[in-house]
Amino acid sequence: MSVKFNWSCPYCNRDSTITDSNFSKSVHRYNQDNKDGESAIITTVITCPNENCKEYTIKGTLQSFDSNTLEISPDVRFEWSMKPNSMAKQFPSYIPKAITTDYEEACLIKELSPKASATLSRRCLQGIIRDFHKVNKGRLVDEIKAIEKKVDPVTWQAIDAVRSIGNIGAHMEKDINLIIDVEPKEAQLLIGLIEILIKDWYVAKHERQQHLESIIGVADTKAAEKKSNKSSNSDDEKAAASS
């Protein structure tokens, strides 16, 4: 069966369509009377089609399989990224280092400790709000309330949800026997929101500013050319009059 799907390279951030020519997949099935039963390790390798990149990713998943049908369960028991060591996106250097560091660590620890990843996403969110919106009220809940009128309702609700889920790892429950887990997929959702905020707030603002500055630059250049032409014409007229 041929392969064709959209993919974003974690190295160059270019979106592309992956086909058989840059995709490889292998399956290793095993049992050997292990405690989890029939299992399969699936590895996928993707090479970036961008001629200026050509980096590649290696990803592995651990899943169950049925030896009678050889069908592999769609449920992923464990997932890890071998190259790069996390699926963190590469953001421009103008994003504050403290924010990208927390984001990268949240990505790195997502599978090993989703709860810790969620806590880091919460911390990253607080850093973004404080830096971008210049809000610093001590408590994240108060800072989120302060920006409610500055963002659309759905984004605001998602931001508050990151705070709520991140609190699971940041604060101990009053009943220490009450254990609330965070799943890797849930931690990834929080990471996804951080990526959206960085793109929508920082990257979009930077690109908009660059575009506007380019327009101003063109206008200044045209004004200078016009002034130069007028000066040249005036000199020509004076020269003609004196001859």
Image: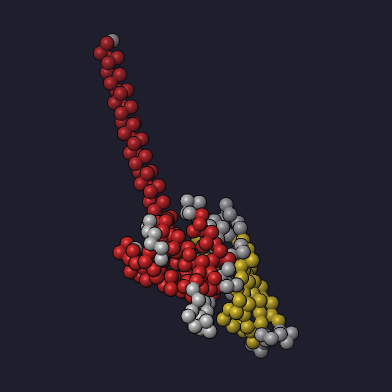
Quarter-of-image position of residue 84: bottom right
The one nearer the camera, 138 or 215, is 138
Residue, x 56% and y 58% (percent of image)? Answer: 11
The one nearer the camera, 234 or 192, is 192
Q: Is residue 158 left or right of residue 41?
A: left
Does residue 16 appear in this view? no
Whole-percent x, y for residue 34 in the image: 71, 85
Q: Farthest right residue? A: 32
Residue, x 69% and y 86% (percent of image)? Answer: 35
Quadrant of image for the C terminus: top left
Whole-percent x, y for residue 10 in the image: 55, 60
Whole-percent x, y for residue 223 in the image: 31, 34
Quarter-of-image position of residue 146: bottom left
Quadrant of image for the N terminus: bottom right
The one nearer the camera, 19 or 30, is 30
Residue, x 49% and y 73% (percent of image)? Answer: 171
